Amino acid sequence: MELELKGKRAVVCGASKGLGYATAQALLEEGATAVIAARDETHLNRAADTLAAEAGCRPITVSADLTLAADRQRLVDTAMAQLGGIDILVANAGGPPPGPFESHPAEHWQLAIDLALGSLTHLTTLVLPGMKEQRFGRIVQIVSIAGLEVIDGLILSNASRPAVLGFARALAREIGPHGVLINSICPGIFKTDRMEQLAQSRAEAQGITVDQYFESLAADIPLGRIGNPKELGDLAAFLCSPRNTYITGAAIPIEGGKMRRLY
């Protein structure tokens, strides 16, 4: 399928590795131009070099901490100046620290809110006027299945992620008449750095190896394996594309059938 992304201008957050990187790769391979952002400038530039080799187009890089309003403003200003406009926003701010309720001080709760809701709403505020004016825009937020079901040890995510899904669902009704679509992708278990960190701590707590822990996770997934970030990137590219004309406000799980929820 031709996704008609050639010439589309994208901002992809959290793109130095993992799911954000896979999304940037998919968009670039389909002919989009992109500004990619992440906190670590060294990792970000390394990712841009790799993307240039893999996709044939080097993205513009902006080192930014999405919990900071000034960095979010600078990211969007740079994209507007360098690309001439923004057609696509992929909001991917990572997740808050894991752990049970009593392990989290007040600053962890504020971080969860800033990461999940604060960064997304501000970035949307910054890009939406231009999208409405040109009557085309695609906003995709990478969330988590923790927004759809309770996951032990991720209470910060379970508390903050549903707010993000509610925001997108409500906003979709407001911006749909202007040709702007917003959707949420809710990944399950993917081989990312964050998942590696969670696996390390949980494996130690259970007295098993990290490989054994991943095997136990895969055993609970009907497809029998952990997800490949490229699979999520391909989904994101479709949702960001002009070929997506009738999906908006959706919270789309991509988790190999792991969840047991009915609705």
Image (cartoon, grey):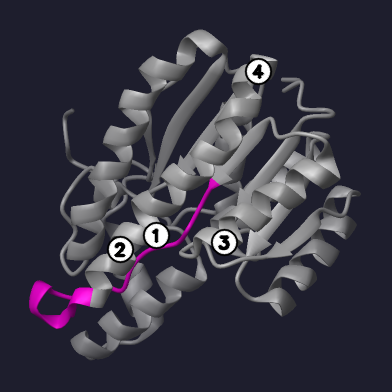
Residue at the (10%, 72%) spot, across then down: 101
Question: How far is disc 4 from disc 1 in space, using C-alphas?
Answer: 28 Å
Whichever of callouts 3 and 4 sits on the residue coming sooner in the sequence is 3
**For numbered disc 3, what is the local secondary structure?**
helix
Separation (CA) of disc 2 from disc 3: 18 Å
Is residue 96 part of the magenta span, yes or no? yes
- Pointer 2: residues within 10 angstroms few (<14), some, or many (20+)? many
Earlier in the chain: of badge 4 and badge 1, it is 1
The residue labelled by disc 4 is 133
Residue drawn where x is 46% and y is 18% of the image: 175
Query: Which residue in the protein does label 3 denote?
Result: 70
Task: Tell me which label, 2 or 3, sits earlier in the chain.
Answer: 3
Q: Which numbered circle lies on residue 115?
A: 1
Spot occupied by residue 102 in the image (x, y as percentages of width and height): 8, 79
Question: Label 1 to label 2, Cα distance in Å?
Answer: 5 Å
Three-letter code for the amino acid on which mark 2 is drawn: Ala
Of the 4 image quadrants, the one containing the C terminus is top left
Q: Give the range drawn in magenta.
A: 91-106
